[in-house]
Image (tube, rainbow, N blue to C red):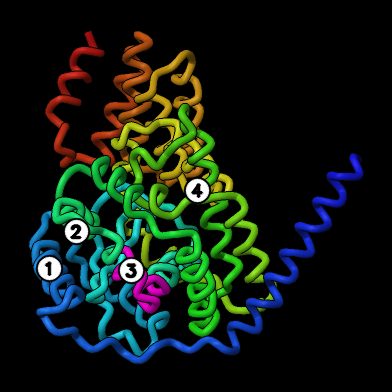
Amino acid sequence: MNRRVILAAGCLCAAWLACGSAFAQKEKEWAAPPRFVRPEIATDEGGLWSMMDREETRLRRSPFSIRDPALHDYVQDIACRLAGEHCADVRVHLVHTPLFNASMSPNGMMQVWTGLMLRVDNEAQLAAVLGHEIGHYLSRHTLERLRDIKSRSAFGQFLGLFGLVGAVGQLAVLASAFAYSRDQEREADRIGLILMRQAGYDPLEASKVWRNLQLELKARPDGDPSRTNPMFASHPASEERQQTLKTLAEAAPGGSAFEERWKEKLTPFMRGWLADEVKRGQHEESIALFTRMIAYAPTRPEFFCARADSYRTRGKGEDWKAAQSDYDAAISIGGEPAETHRGLAAIYRQRKQLPEARASFQRYLELAPDAPDAAMIKSYIEESGT
């Protein structure tokens, strides 16, 4: 091996070890600030709080807001365990949007998107993202960003990051424009890991979140998911950052991932969120995501079905063969979604294999007799029987 490469690797290793040692010391010294007092309305901060209150009212009324009490209470409890004394001021809102994102405004409004919950493997990984956002909140980073914004139009755009105004793609552009600084990101990462440890979570799961997102980043044809995802735009998922998080966590190991509890709480929603991801139309990203999910949990038929749907709807070259293989795998596992048979039937129908298409369509209706497309499927069955 080249001597310079060895030297560089040794220096990098030493730097990471020093980083971990410094983190262990800072963890002992760090303490959360006291609860924030609502600022006077006449101040810049007070005006921002008031505007965020109005955005929060809009969010509560939004059709994108998920109103499942059990799921909300579960995620709220995670946020509270991380926030400690600030729990009373943190209000979680679950948002039905198939992208990886979470955000927190200065008045305590936290948004958690369903695309984030789909992509994390356990409770500790969600806690890693929420802890990072709470780190920004405790450090008042959003207020620092506000003071950097001079024009009224830019301020209006800044508010759009916390509401559901405009298209998701527009929010991604704005997130990139108003991204946190590197120092702010490092501080939020450090605080997030401290909060994870204090709440009983394994801090090593934090680096895995960004490692997994790297797979989607590399799968995109342009290699730039920040164009469609606010979290990638405002929180760059660099390999260096991932390694730093890993090194910091290894300096203070312990805690649990709470994987089984996470699976129990999320299973009722998983199939719907998988379908949302397929409909997003970013097939390369989705296939990379589903491939990782299959490797992590190879006995979940819904993951095979979702990847098959992505292959089938992309329709490049011999994608139909990959889709058929995944549909067959889902069926062999058992307990497959009804949509598995509908997708398989679509392939048979396209390939002019009408008897097979008819049998698969019939199986779909047996599993989902009240499906909204039942009338159309029946017409396909009649067609394939001629």
Q: Nearer the viewer, residue 148 or 334?
A: 148
The secondary structure making up most of the magenta span is helix
Answer few, some or many: residues within 10 Å of disc 4's Cα (few below 14, many 20 plus, some between 14 and 19).
many
**Real-space Cα distance between discs 4 and 2?**
26 Å
Residue at left offset 44%, top offset 68%: 132
Magenta-drawn segment: 134-145
Q: State how far apart marks 2 and 1 are (Cα).
A: 8 Å
| Residue 206 visible, this orientation | yes
Residue 216 inside the magenta-drawn segment: no
The residue that label 3 is drawn on is: 144
Amino acid type of the residue tagged 3 in the rendering: Glu
Mark sitting earlier along the chain (2/3): 3
What x and y, as percent, mark residue 32? 43, 87
User: Given this view, does label 4 or label 1 mark the residue nearer the observer?
Assistant: 1
- In the image, what residue occupies the spot 73% across and 71% down? 18
* SS under mark 3: helix
Q: Is residue 336 left or right of residue 376?
A: right
